[in-house]
Image (tube, rainbow, N blue to C red):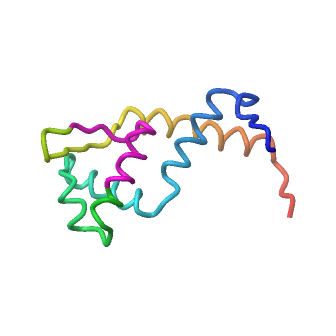
């Protein structure tokens, strides 16, 4: 039986990993591109431009929303989503800091 050691890592490390996990599917990247182009989008419009079933798109939207990368509202059968730019800015800064710190610590090439 595996022991879950997620708690051994800082909250920032856990948050960055969740952010990366949310982006780790090409359909989610495509959905974010559609949302960025339209600034707000109805789920049906996303389905129309992607080669995925509506239920699959809904599942990816749910994952993006759970990660805080998009905001959404449901009004009856109509669902509207937009990118949560504050979350993207936060993670952009945190990833930039991570990459900078990794680069500073490893000034020599290992290969």
In the rendered image, residue 96, in percent from the top left (x then y), is placed at 58, 41
Furthest-bottom residue in this view: 51
As drawn, 81 above or below 31: above
The image quadrant where one finds the C terminus is bottom right
101, 46: nearer the viewer: 46
45 with respect to 70 (left or right)? left
97 with respect to 66 (left or right)? right
Residue at the spot 45% in from the left edge and 39% down from the top edge? 67
**Res 66 quadrant in image:** top left
Task: Confirm whether the magenta stretch covers residue 70.
Answer: yes
Residue at the spot 34% in from the left edge and 41% down from the top edge? 70
Residue at the spot 32% in from the left edge and 68% down from the top edge? 52
In the rendered image, residue 27, in percent from the top left (x then y), is placed at 40, 62
93, 13: nearer the viewer: 13
Question: What is the total number of numbered labels drawn onto the structure image?
Answer: 0
The image quadrant where one finds the N terminus is top right
As drawn, 39 above or below 53: above
**Res 26 quadrant in image:** bottom left
54 with respect to 18 (left or right)? left
For the record, the magenta segment spans 58-73
In the rendered image, residue 41, in percent from the top left (x then y), is placed at 19, 50
Residue at the spot 31% in from the left edge and 59% down from the top edge? 55
Task: Confirm whether the magenta stretch covers residue 63.
Answer: yes
90 with respect to 16 (left or right)? left
């Amino acid at each position: 039986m595996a022991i879950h050691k997620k708690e051994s890592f800082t909250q920032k490390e856990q948050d960055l990993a969740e952010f990366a996990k949310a982006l780790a599917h090409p359909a989610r990247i495509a959905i974010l591109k559609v949302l960025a182009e339209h600034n707000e989008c109805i789920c049906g419009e996303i389905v129309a431009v992607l080669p995925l079933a509506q239920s699959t798109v809904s599942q990816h939207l749910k994952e993006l929303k759970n990660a805080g990368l998009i905001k959404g509202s449901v009004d009856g059968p109509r669902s509207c989503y937009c990118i949560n730019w504050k979350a993207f800015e936060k993670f952009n800064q945190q990833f930039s800091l991570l990459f900078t710190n990794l680069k500073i610590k490893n000034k020599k090439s290992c290969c």
